[in-house]
Image: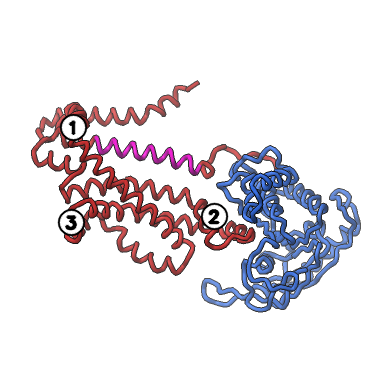
Chain colours: A red, B blue
Amino acid sequence: MISGSSLVARAAPLLACLGLLAIWQVGSLAMNNESVPTALEALRAVPSIMGDKESLINILASLRRMAIGFGIAVLLSIPLGLLMGRNRFVASFFNPLLMVTYPVPKAALMPIIMLWIGVGDLSKTLVIFLGVSLPVIYHSFEGAKAVEEKMLWSGAAMGMSAAERMVRIVLPAALPEILTGCRTGLVLALITMVTSEMIARQSGAGNILFNALDMGQYDTVFAMIIVIGAMGICFDALFEMLRARLVRWSEPQFDMPLSFS
Amino acid sequence: MIAIDHVSQIFQTSSRKDHLALSDISLIVEDGAFVSILGPSGCGKSTLLYIVGGFVNPSQGAARMKGKPITGPGPDRGPVFQEFALFPWKTVLGNVMYGPRQQGVKTAEAEAQSRVLIEMVGLKGFEDFYPKELSGGMKQRVALARTLAYHPEVLLMDEPFGALDAHTRTRLQNDLLNIWERDRKTVLFVTHSVDEAVFLSDKVVMMTRSPGRIREIIDIDLPRPRRRTELLLDSRYQKYVVDIERMFDDGGEAELPR
């Protein structure tokens, strides 16, 4: 039996989206500006993008780069972050490098990277990789640092080697924090994916958007923004489902712990 | 047998001063003995336990287990910490099975042994619970079972009941003694509670306030198996408790270790 208030809570995200579209619709009608299409016009342009084979190829190419960049970044960043969290030397070596590179918008490196390795897939994937790496390294680092010493001692007493403790204690203990980093990384991957294509116009979702902008097809521009936003929501929701499954043990489940000694 | 031989421990404080935590400790713990290390907080008693566990290297001196110098942690010495230190991503059963699996025991066998231990510590029915779903007393029961599961020769208990309320604490003390009576493993038990030390131990090692030195070693000559309700009325038990509390009082170097 779903109570009224939980029904409202479930419908809230949908209501928020509808509200945003309604404001957009009213606002664009009021502004009556050619470069601001109404929400309905933009929504109407969505199927024409999704139905166009070339657009789809472009979007899929974007997603492929994003997946590769994100995947490699996660695979390399988690071990590095964990090592940093448990080894003072590794931390003091990499920490300054991270502090310097963290605030640099990775897409701003795009022109230089294009000079070095061209405008193809490699440079765009590299930029996505850089964008994802930092939050994942940082959160893995923090997660590993916070692992209780006594937990590692308990493992050592069972006969686990340092490497085993890293994989079988530090990694699972830090997993909630690591996945928080990955979630940030996923959003950043989408952002850097679009911005890299804004700078290196050759293919991709960003390419469709900025070409349409050049040609004054404002309904397509906004439709593409809707498509990218929708992808963001979907990825985040899917990732959140995966995260919740993996770290169910860390989330409060009962309001009160069982009371019995 | 554990032999602690002229062990001293010096720490660097955050202001880079040397702090002498333990000063020239020598102690022999016989096999099968239940020995408590009793002292005020900050006297280095936990550090002494960590040195025996191999988690901390002494600045001077050495600890030996069966004649062999202790150079690191090992499954012959099983720790139980005040902080429980359970693996939160594992269920109760998963936590208890962890040690035997690590030792190469087959899954089915490790599970069977672990279920027996879980029942022994009074947690039958909670095998599939995660640590976050348990109370403090239950967590410490799991921690004890997890350590017993890999059959250490010595139990190193670091104020294991220190974080628990008085009622839970009493129940766990009783249960610990009952479990200990079955195989009488060597136990080194760190505590700051005088009655806990007297109730549980064959021998109480009294330490001074920092820098920790051994002040007195008292043999507790009370019959076993011990029952709390009987002991509380026993004048010998009362005398041990009062004598030890007086010693802490008149020494001038330590407050009543409560």
Task: Determine if marks 1 and 2 fall on one subunit.
Answer: yes
Residue position for label 2: A169
In x, y percent, where is residue B56? 62, 69
- Pair 1/2: label in front: 1
Q: Earlier in the sequence, mark 1 or mark 3?
A: 1
**Is A26 displayed left or right of B35 in the figure?**
left
Q: Earlier in the sequence, mark 2 or mark 3?
A: 3
Q: Dividing the picture into quarters, in which one does residue A206 lie?
A: top left
Frontmost residue, B144 versus A159: A159
In x, y percent, where is residue A52? 18, 32
**Chief SS of the magenta region:** helix
Which amino acid type is marked by label 3? Gly
- In what quadrant of the picture does the C terminus of chain B appear? bottom right
Residue position for label 1: A52
In x, y percent, where is residue A219? 15, 32
Frontmost residue, B258 versus B85: B85
Q: Which mark is residue B84?
A: none
Which amino acid type is marked by label 2? Ile
Q: Which mark is residue A118?
A: 3
- In what quadrant of the picture does the N terminus of chain B appear? bottom right
**Is A34 displayed left or right of B202 in the figure?**
left
